Amino acid sequence: MGRITLDKVRKAFGEVEVIPPLDLTIEDGEFVVFVGPSGCGKSTLLRLIAGLEDVSGGQIRIDGQDATMVPPAKRGLAMVFQSYALYPHMSVRKNIAFPLRMAKLDPAEQNRRVEAAAEVLNLTDYLDRRPGQLSGGQRQRVAIGRAIVREPAAFLFDEPLSNLDAALRVGMRLEISELHKRLKTTMIYVTHDQVEAMTMADKIVVLRAGHIEQVGSPLELYREPRNTFVAGFIGSPKMNLLEGAEAEKRGATTVGIRPEHITPSATEGQWKGRVGVAEHLGSDTFFHVHVDGWPEPITVRAGGEVDMNHGDTIYLTPDEERMHRFDAQGLRIA
Amino acid sequence: MARAVTTQRKAINTTIAWAIGLLIFFPILWTILTSFKTEGEAVANPPVFLFFDWTLENYAVVQERSNYMRFLWNSIIIAGGSTLLGILVAVPAAWSMAFVPSKRTKDILLWMLSTKMLPAVGVLYPIYLLCIELGVLDSRAALVVILMLINLPIIVWMLYTYFREIPGEILEAARMDGAGLKEELLYILTPMAVPGIASTLLLNFILAWNEAFWTLNLTAVDAAPLTAFIASYSSPEGLFFAKLSAASTMAIAPILILGWFSQKQLVRGLTFGAVK
């Protein structure tokens, strides 16, 4: 079981309040991603749940039990760190067995669980090596192995993939998602990468300056961002946010349209502009278009192999159904 | 990128380094050589360097006149005891300053170091009187404690530097894995800091071994270590350079051998954290 409830949890470092009182419930078995720009308090929030930082107020409950004052070792949670935080003087086997050794488990049982975890994570051949002799991806697997052998109530991941190169990151992302499907254990995952958030999460928590901006499934956030911050943060490339005449015409202060909801054409359309940069990815093409009279270029996604280049005239037609409207406070107008 | 160094320049640098090294080592070499001369040759003018009648007579006389083993044993007890005691006090102190620093940590560290700037003779009188009052003058126990206190700032500073090099996330991982403070110190911190602790032990053993001011002033017979053994040969009855040299050689030999075998460890320890 791993249901985690945060009740008016707040954190201040001296005079500075990094997390104002915050409520959040994470259901058992859920994959929850905390996402936000750097400095938004997402890692601090994770460390509060882990018990590595003391809360300045409020209550943390794990499976209904008050865990606010419980030391990290006794919370039954496992954590995977950004730097992997492996013990450099121990072999992979000893690293993975360490939490079991601390729990004073029978050595035969320790060994059985280590071998099983190594099997799952493809580490069997590396059990007698030291962390220093492993690649980044393998080290990350050892860190995950150390977390899974304990059979914790929940896994906490603190930007676990940010030290890996792009290709490995995609692979590990899938592995962690598969692990979640198999173990069905609660996972809380911190990242600043919205692609990781969208691809892995059951539930995304978008944070800014310690505040929860929105909580929802990836597609909920994509379809109905509650404010301009979430609108701009979720989705890649970013949603185009327009102010002025275009917004007023639709009865809003700001309107947003995603690059994939604009249809480009060489001959006719609602807006006329000129292609600035054209990014041809093969599967997709992204045009940065300077529309006449607008201060900022807007991004448009077209299908692959569209033959338009820098300087060409382009016509754009937004899908009015997918247009997002926001008021003067930046909040969504229903 | 590495700077290109010409062969010629390398040769010049090597020569200079060797010259400085030899200059520093020369007095020790001269002491060792003199210990094998007769008293006459020891004061000969012009001095003889290598071509004299090598003799072991001085060593025999020194051995006959004083009990070398007793001084050696005192030195080992005092240097070893003060170093071990120092480590026991310094490990928790350095741990708390490195991993749970407060606003005052830097001040405390500097204040501790500042005690090393005080001339030792400035506190000789109170400490001497204290030793008399407590009835511990000329006792090994008193010297163990005093030398421990004298070297403590250095031990704490060195360990603090090593501990700071250990990433905090590793200790946090251990905490998440269920390690309490005791397990954290025992299974994670200490094994990771072994090279640092070893070179700290070594350096402090050497410092304590060579400590002369306190050992000479606070001992007479019972607790006298090798420093007192050497000093006893610079006697008012006239200087016997060859015998003094033999005594000196016998006193420095153990530490010289220890230093030789552990030089790698020492250099690594002293430059730890400087390059990464």
Image: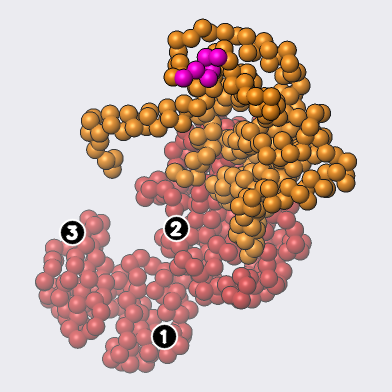
Chain colours: A red, B orange
The structure residue drawn at horizontal position 26% and vertical position 75%, both measured from the top left corner, is A298
How far apart are the two marked residues, 1 and 3, measured between alpha carbons?
Answer: 34 Å
For mark 1, does the 10 Å Cα neighbourhood hold few (<14), some (14 to 19), or many (20 or more) residues?
A: many
**Image marks 2 and 3: residues in contact by CB distance under 8 Å:** no
Identify the residue under disc 2: A196
What is the x, y in percent for residue A38? 46, 66
- Residue A154: x, y in percent? 64, 54
Label 2 to label 1: alpha-carbon separation: 26 Å
User: Marks 2 and 3, Cα distance to the nearest angstrom?
Assistant: 27 Å
Q: Quadrant of residue B213?
A: top right
Judging by the rendered image, the residue that carries numbered circle 3 is: A305
Specify few, some or many for label 3: CA neighbours under 10 Å numbering under 14, 14-19, or 20 or more.
few
Parent chain of label 3: A
Q: Is residue B37 left or right of residue B60?
A: left
Q: Nearer the viewer, mark 1 or mark 3?
A: 1
- Residue ID for mark 1: A326
